[in-house]
Image: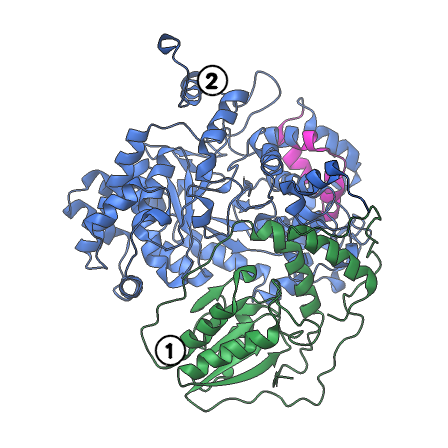
Amino acid sequence: MQINEELVTQITHAILAQMGQDAEPSSKPVPSMAGHSRINDEKTSYAGYPKAKQGTDPKEVVIGVGAAFQREIKKTICGIPLDDVLKNIKAGIEEEGMVARVVKVLDTSDVCFMALEAAKLSGSGFGIGIQSKGTTVIHQKDLYPLSNLELFPQAPLMTLETYRKIGQNAAKYVKGEQVVPIPCENDPMCRPKFQVKAALMHIAETEQLDPELGIIEWEEE
Amino acid sequence: MKRSKRIETLDKRPVNLDGFINEWPEMGFAAMSSPYDPTPSVTVREGQIVELDGKKREEFDFIDQFIADYAINIDKAAESMAMPSLEIARMIVDIHVSRREILDIVSGITPAKMTEVMNHLNVVELMMGMQKIRARKAPGNQAHITNLKDDPVQIAADAAEGALRGFAEEETTMGVARYAPLSAMALLIGSQVGRPGVLTQCSAEEATELELGIRGLTTYAETLSVYGTEKVFIDGDDTPYSKAFLNSAYASRGLKVRFTSGSGSEVLMGNSEKCSMLYLECRCLYATKGAGSQGIQNGSVSCIGVPGSVPGGIREVMSENLVAALLGLECASSNDQSFSNSDMRRTARTMLQFLPGTDFIFSGYAAEPNYDNMFAGSNFDAEDFDDYNVLQRDMQVDGGLRPVTEEEVIRVRNKAAKAVQAVFRQLGLSPVTDEQVEAVTYAHGSKDTLPRDVTADLLAAEDVLKRGITGVDVVKALAESGFRDVAESVLNMLKQRVAGDYMQTSAILDKDFHVLSGVNTPNDYMGPGTGYRVEGKRWEEIKQIPHIINPKEL
């Protein structure tokens, strides 16, 4: 994340404390962020990027990534590099013989809507939404927005293997197979440990939205 | 730096795994008040509010407009707004001023004024307020009934045990959303095995939840979310008007329903408009009242990590519960989400609702081990049952639960599992084996149960929807397979929707299906010697915890 120094200190303290690691012992008070109205002072411009096309390939699964994905945010909430996340989802899709396409969603940071918009753009009608913090949904274009095929709400529990399986399952839905949903993971202590970090990451994502641009084609950097 | 062993020990305490952050009002990290909160004001012209909390009608967003048009008593506005906030705050804790008088006064104040009133009350005063302002005379409790496998047999068994333990309402949800019809059905059956009259709901996507309700597979609904800023509302594809419409859809079918809100959601979604969590939550509660809902689930709920991270956050959570009660709403007061790594901190947080009593102290309490709680963990779980019963006994407080015996637990779990097995067989759904029934009967959680055939279950769930199976089909299946008493109970639950009495504020049902609500059993607390007291049979029941020393066996 490109962020100012005060915030780095503040987040580092909050996060290290949450993850049970010892921060550098220090009696210095954490500086106040009061008065700041953004996390990243600069907003990335995507003017000039190609608008995402409506897909026609019936083998296609569209992956809709968050506005800050691979730019302001480079790792998920539990530290998995987003490059690897994307690589594994795409590999999962390809292993099942389907085709992946990545778009960046700039008009919403709500993961259900991101996934639904990806599904609507997809030639097969199936799509995946991923927030930069790692929260993921598999969606289908005819479902209600807040319904879904599979939802992985606890981003801190995600692994690269789960992301690969998400790609595989999305591809299996395209093929019309009877899909066994990926077993749920649950850690009741995720919330106390990670919710504040989740809020900060979501703010960092949301402040990068550019609804005028809508959805753009997104290739890996 | 050479480290102090004392500080090192403290650093390792569970409370230091929790997330804390400094106040940051620009991003909404401010609990009770923000320098950007509006100043209270109201102007009424020709029977219409034309100015609210510093905003002119033409500047209103849709929440302001909804509140101005439907949630404030215009006849009281001038008089109530002229009263100093401090005076209203004092009346809330004054035992000589009745609940009714206070509700009448606050019916005319604005969200910003309500925020100001709460800022005059400390946590003990907030609790004194809740003891008097809660709608129903006796407090109640609600359970979460879920598991990691979405196993309907376990749902039924846990629902039966939860009902036996005293929960008046039970709520389920799923890891895999498509399980909903089976989860709802299992919860309905299991709850009635444990104690007739327990209300059940299935938290799902709104259209699905409504459909399950209309079919009689659930007996109330709760997950109608409202938010404190327009942007977050829009992100949820909603407006206060659409929520009011959905509320009416339930009402038209005679179903009890409450809304859901809670501080921190606007912060989490990055759109707090720089206002305090309490002020935004007041807006949610006014929108809820304006939409005609009888009640609310609030107290930060799933966003508790956010108010929990800032100074005064837990005082704010109790304030929002009290605001709900002050608006005359049934309050299901959260405590339903894992909140702290510290046992001390999580217990202290719950005492604010437990000691004065709320309509539902938890919304809900995990009646399974937390690893099975599909709401991502509750503040208390099945492993805390005995602690909770002892807390009730220590303080002579009614927390809505009661001690049970192992024999009773095994009996109701087994009967509920068998009833679900029979209904699934009768309706031609996915099979339940005797081994599954046995495992679930004696299980603590899903680690002790057998795997389900998920594909078969999901096909069966789809089938329930396709074939139009309703609560009446469940009644028939129960009656035809020898579970006549359970069939009677489920039928009685369906009849409530025709009578409609349980749609009154804060309604629950006793074991004979009589409604106990804020209307026929109103809270009449006016200080010592009045209101609800833990005494008689209920006190004897609370005393009977397990593991009491028998002097003869020393």
For the residue marked with disc 2, what is the amino acid?
Glu
> Does residue B152 appear anywhere in the picture?
yes
At horizontal 59% and vertical 45% (from top left) the residue drawn is B339
In the foreground, B149 or B114: B149
On residue B535, the disc is 2
Crowding at mark 2 (Cα within 10 Å: few <14, some 14-19, many 20+): few
Up-down: is A103 above or below A80? below
In the foreground, B114 or B369: B369
Residue B315 percent across, percent down from the top left: 69, 39
Q: Is residue B43 left or right of residue B431?
A: right
Protein chain holding label 1 = A
At horizontal 55% and vertical 66% (from top left) the residue drawn is A135
Up-down: is B11 above or below B272? above
Q: Which residue is mark 1?
A: A172
Q: Which chain is green?
A: A
Q: Which chain is blue?
A: B
Residue B229 percent across, percent down from the top left: 67, 59
Q: Is residue B381 left or right of residue B425?
A: right
Q: Which residues are magenta?
A: B97-126
- Colouring mode (rainbow / by chain / secondary structure / one colour): by chain
Residue B499 percent across, percent down from the top left: 35, 42
Q: Give yes or no for residue A217 being in the magenta stretch.
A: no
For this orientation, the residue located farthest to the front is B2
For the residue marked with disc 1, what is the amino acid?
Lys
Residue B242 percent across, percent down from the top left: 54, 62
Protein chain holding label 2 = B
Q: Is residue B378 left or right of residue B81?
A: left
On residue B536, the disc is none
